[in-house]
Amino acid sequence: MYNSKVGAILALLLAVFITAAGCTAPGTQPPEEGEPDYPIDSLVLTTVDRTVLPVGVPSTSPALHPDQVANFSEYGYGVWEFGEGLDYEKRLDLMPDGYTPGSDTNAEQLLTFFAMSDIHITDKESPAQVVYYGYKWGVISGYSPAMLYTTHVLDAAVQTVNALHKEDPFDFGIFLGDAINSGQYNELQWYIDVLDGRMVNPDSGDRDDPIPGPLNDYQDQYKAAGLDESIRWYQVLGNHDHFWMGLFPPDDHVNSALTGTAVLELGNIFSDPRQLKSRGFYMGAIDGRTPHGDIIGAGSVTDFPDGSPTVPADQNRSFLSRTEWIGEFLDSSSSPKGHGFNQSDRTTGFACYSFEPRSDVPIKVIVLDDTQRDDDPGEGSSGFGSIDQERYDWLVQELESGQAEGQLMIIAAHIPIVIQEDEAGLSSLMKWSQYAAVSDVDLIAKLQTYPNLMAWISGHRHQNTVIPIKSPDVDRPELGFWQVETASLREFPQQFRIFEVVYNGDNTVSIFTTNVDPAVRDGSPAAQSRSYAIAAQQIFQSPVEMKPSGAYNAELVLQLTPEMQEILQKTRRDL
C-alpha cells in the first residue's frame, strides 16, 4: 500500500550545457515552419461525446511497484477504452427556490475560452528532485512514469485546442499555474517552446537516445505544433513555478544540486524541523539512457558506500526567481506580448493583472497570484493559498472597478479558496495559509459583495470539481458565485476545460464547463503517457474525483442584477 501521512504532504509536489543539449532560449528565434512531428488523431471530440475509461487490472496480475514500467503492459496496467459521453448537469445551486429555467432558444454566447492547469513540465534527469519520496513513500506527485512525457502531452493538448478552435473559435486561452515542476529554467524553456511552436529538446545533461533513431523515444527532439497564432493565451503563477518542487524557496544546498552532478541528499523534510537542512537519503533521478526511464541514485545514504551518485550536469537547470519566471513570458513569440505580464512585473515580481477578452462583451478576467510569498513565515511548506495586503488591495480595486463599469467578472488563480474534503485527508494540507493578509472566510465574504462576480477558476489539486459558493442573503442570489477546478495534464485524467459563457435572454447567465481529453494518436508519446498515468493511478490508488473518467461537465446558472440584464440585452442587440 502506497499511502502515508508524509505521502499526503507530498501530494503538494508535482513538480550538459546549452550546446550539448541543443537548447536555445525561448523567443530568440521565430517559430519553425512545418507540421508537428507528433500529430494528434484526426478525430477530435470532447467528453460530451466520449470519455476515456481505465480498464481494471486483471485479478491474476501481481501488485507492481510504480517503477516497474517495463512490466506494465505484460500485467495489464495502464489499459483504457472509450466510454459513453457525459452530458451537462444543469446546476441551479445558486438560484432561488422555485426558479424554473427558461427556453434555450434565446441563448447567446458571450465568451468561450479554454483553461489548462498543472502541466508540470519536468526535467526528469535533474539531480534535484524528490523521486525517492515518490516511488518509495508512495506518492504519485513525487514520481510517476508519466513524467517522461510532459512536453509531449502539452503538445497534444495544444493541437487538440487548435482543432476545436477551427470548429468554434476561442476568444482566448488561460494556463492556471504550475507550468513547470521544479522551478528550473530549462523546464520553462520547454513549456514556452511548445506553446510557441518551436523545436523542443526534452533532454538535459548529456545527449541521450535510449532507442537509436529519431522520434521513437521520450528524449528525441521534435517539432511542436504551437498554439494557433490567432489565440491569445494568458498565464497564471503557481506554487511550483517559483518554489522548488512547489514547497520551499531553494537554499544553497538545493541550488548547488540543481546545476551540479551530485544527486541531492535530504532527510525527511516533512517531519524533520531542519527541513532542507536534513540529510540521510539520496533523492534519485531518471536515467535518460534507458527506454523506460529507470530510477537511479535513490535510497538511503548507507546504500551508497562510494558516496553520492552522480548525473551529467546542466547549467540550464538553474532555478528561476519569481521575476525571472515572469521575464521569460515577455520573450515568448506568441501573443499577447508577455501573456498578461509587463516589463514592470519583470522588475517587481507582481504577478496579478486583468484583461477584457472582447471589446464588445462586458466581461473582465482578473488574474490573481494567490501563492505564498517567497518570504512567507511558512506552514511547513509553500503549497497553501495566500495573498498579502498588496494583492488583496489590488483585487478589491479590480472588483470595484468591474462592478462600477457593469462588467461580469471571472477570477483566475492557481489555488482554490474552498477545498473539497477527500478520503486521503489532503484538503487540510492545501488550505488557505494562516499567514495570509486576509483569511479565506473573510475573502469569500468580501467576494460575496460583488454581484457581477461569476466564478473563481483554479487548478492546484489536480481534480475536476465544481463548488457553489452561495449568497449569504437568500433575497440576493446574485451574490453567489461558482468555483471551478481543472485537473492536471500530468496525472490521470490528463484533461483541460472549455468554458462558455452564455446569456440566457432572461435574468440569468450560464457557464458551460466541458472537459476535454487530448486527442492522442495511437503509438505517440502522448498516448504512452496516458497509459503510464493510468497505470500510476492504479498502483498508487490516489484519489480521483468524478470517477471513472475523472471528467465533469456542467451548466452553471447564475442570477443577474437588473442592471446587468439591461447591459446584456443591449450587448446582445449589438453582437
Image (cartoon, helix red, strand yellow):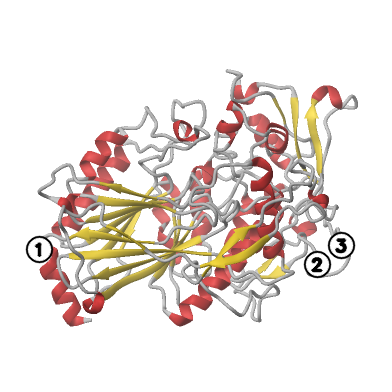
Cβ–Cβ under 8 Å for marks 3 and 2: yes
Label 2 vs 1, first from the N-terminus:
2
Residue 95 left/right relative to 317: left
Name above or below for residue 502 compared with residue 16: below
Q: Residue 313: x and y, percent?
A: 78, 45
Q: How far apart are marks 1 and 3 (CA)?
A: 63 Å
Quadrant where the image shows the N terminus: top right
| Residue at the extreme front of the image, as rendered | 59
Query: Which amino acid type is shown beneath numbered disc 1?
Result: Glu
Q: How many marks can you see?
A: 3
Residue 366 left/right relative to 383: left
Q: Residue 141: x and y, percent?
A: 62, 42
Look at the numbered disc 2 and give the secondary structure of its residue. Answer: loop
Q: Name the residue under label 1.
A: 563
Observer-nearest of 494 and 233: 494
What is the number of the mark on residue 211? 3
Label 3 vs 2, first from the N-terminus:
3
Q: How far apart are marks 3 and 2 (CA)?
A: 7 Å
Cβ–Cβ under 8 Å for marks 2 and 1: no
Observer-nearest of 355 and 42: 42
Residue 181 left/right relative to 131: left
Q: Quarter of the image holding residue 128?
A: top right
Look at the numbered disc 3 and give the secondary structure of its residue. Answer: loop
Residue 437 left/right relative to 329: left
Name above or below for residue 385 compared with residue 526: above
Query: Which amino acid type is shown beneath numbered disc 3?
Result: Ile
Name above or below for residue 72 compared with residue 87: above
User: How many residues crowd mark 1 within 10 Å: few (<14), some (14–19), many (20+)?
Assistant: few
Q: Mark 2 points at which residue?
A: 216
Residue 143 visible at all: no
User: How many residues crowd mark 2 within 10 Å: few (<14), some (14–19), many (20+)?
Assistant: some
